[in-house]
């Protein structure tokens, strides 16, 4: 498991691909930090990067939703639901009382992030990309 950008994530929509790559770059920084021996001491640093990832994700979601709205994308409500689920989940993990078992919570966050982002791009984002490009 890692935050690794793959060619198959490319949707051939330049700005979107750029934003997705950026998401993976920030995610990879979180992941790398959790691998270090001193990860425990770097807890605050890791949380800061996760927050940055959350902020950038929200920026990206908004960009995507506005773009899809302009294209009258029929599946937009489903898409927005997925975005909202992600944000709510990360916020709840960040808000949890994590003093007890910081590293396992962190691992949980990183696993969720990596799994969700690649699945969402592979299925939901690709779906709108196909529709948009067919209508250009
Ligand atoms: Fe999306
Ligand atoms: Fe996306």
Image (spheres, helix red, strand yellow):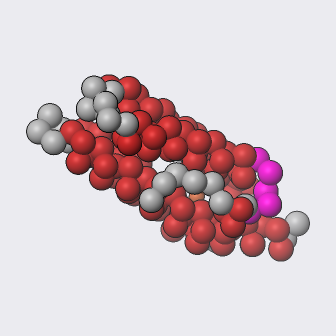
Instruction: Using the rendered image of the protein, determine whether residue 51 is visible from the camera's viewpoint.
Output: no
Residue 77 or residue 97, whichever sits in front: 97
Residue 49 in the figure: left or right of residue 129: left
Magenta-span inclusion, residue 63: no
Residue that sits furthest to the left in the current view: 100
Q: Percent position (x, y) of residue 85?
A: 40, 57
Residue 73 in the figure: left or right of residue 3: right
Instruction: Using the rendered image of the protein, determine whether residue 116 is visible from the camera's viewpoint.
Output: yes
Q: Percent position (x, y) of residue 106?
A: 30, 44
Q: Residue at x 31, y 30 (%)?
A: 38
Residue 87 or residue 101, whichever sits in front: 101
Q: Percent position (x, y) of residue 61?
A: 57, 49
Residue 135 in the figure: left or right of residue 25: right
The image quadrant where one finds the N terminus is bottom left
Q: Residue at x 32, y 35 (%)?
A: 37
Which quadrant holds residue 59?
Answer: top right
The residues colored magenta run 11-15
Residue that sits furthest to the front in the current view: 37
Q: Main secondary structure of the magenta part?
A: loop
* Quadrant location, ligand no. 1: bottom right
Magenta-span inclusion, residue 13: yes
On screen, residue 51 above or below 133: above
């Amino acid at each position: 498991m890692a935050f690794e950008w793959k060619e198959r994530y490319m949707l051939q929509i330049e700005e979107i691909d750029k934003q997705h790559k950026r998401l993976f770059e920030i995610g990879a920084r979180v992941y790398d930090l959790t691998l270090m021996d001193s990860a425990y001491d770097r807890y605050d640093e890791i949380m800061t990067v996760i927050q940055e990832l959350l902020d950038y994700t929200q920026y990206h979601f908004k960009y995507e939703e506005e773009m899809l709205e302009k294209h009258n994308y029929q599946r937009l409500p489903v898409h927005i639901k997925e975005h909202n689920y992600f944000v709510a989940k990360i916020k709840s993990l960040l808000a949890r009382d994590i003093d007890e078992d910081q590293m396992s919570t962190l691992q949980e966050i990183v696993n969720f992030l990596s799994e969700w982002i690649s699945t969402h791009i592979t299925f939901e984002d690709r779906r709108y990309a196909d529709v948009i490009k067919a209508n250009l």
